[in-house]
Amino acid sequence: MNSQSAMTIELIELGDITVEVVKKNIKHIHLRVYPPNGAVRISAPLRMGLDRIQIFADSKLDWIRTQQARLRNDVPETSQVYVDREHHYLWGKPHLLKVVAVDTAPQLKLRDDCLLLQVSPLTTTAQKCEIVDRFYRQQIEAALPPLISKWELLMDVQTKNVTVRKMKTKWGSCTPTLATIRFNSELAKKPPACLEYVVVHELAHLIEPSHNHRFTALMDRFLPRWKFDRSELNRLAI
Ligand SMILES: [Zn+2]
């Protein structure tokens, strides 16, 4: 029998961070934050219960956030420079970028399978980045209203204020006391089911603010496939 066979992988939630727990034949628990995206993994002895692992993880939350912030500062803001033939994701699918020089106002359009970036030859990379970001934000702003209405009805909750902006560490956030929900515009790069998962997740916080057993039960009830969607979402980090 090899030691590889005695290994299990589970996921736990730590605030909005998903932690991979690998149980294997070791004596002591330890935790690592991995570059480049700050993924968190805990290695734990086979017999250790998830409750104890959760307590251990909670005690490390500040340290994890510090490590993730450090990694983010090491990573360039974007590796993309918005030139012809570059691939950009939209709703989970890669699209070829076509850059076209124009004299009119810059914009990004979806044409056939291509993302058409119309800019002047003087447009800087930072400006192109802004145009692309705005395009993604508009995609999410257009996709959200029917989703929110659908799930408000199904979950019997009511949002007061929904906003979309680019965020570095979260796919969404909710302030239950104000019924305010914020979505990350980068969700437009992920399959549509991922946006729906984040909608259900954030709306569930209007019923249960924390990530406890009650919250998990709500997710199981309303969106039985939520764990699959979440792993899709985190397969490539923000
Ligand atoms: Zn949450």
Image (cartoon, grey):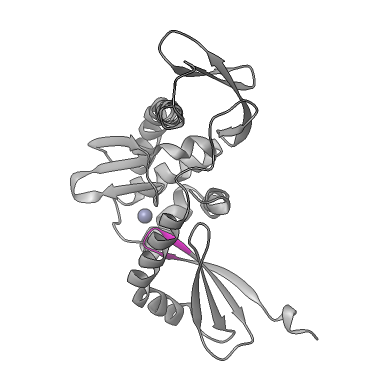
- Quadrant of ligand 1: it is bottom left
- Residue placed most toward the observer, 67 or 18: 67
- In the displayed structure, 138 sits above or below 119; it is below
- Residue placed most toward the observer, 109 or 221: 109
The answer to whether any part of residue 237 appears in the image is yes
- Residue placed most toward the observer, 167 or 172: 167
The residue shown at (59%, 84%) is 46
The answer to whether any part of residue 212 appears in the image is no
- The x and y percentages for residue 237 are 51, 51
In magenta segment, residue 52:
no
The residue shown at (48%, 34%) is 188
- The x and y percentages for residue 59 are 35, 77
Quarter of image, res 47: bottom right
Quadrant into which the N terminus falls? bottom right
Residue interval drawn in magenta: 13-18
- The x and y percentages for residue 74 are 45, 57
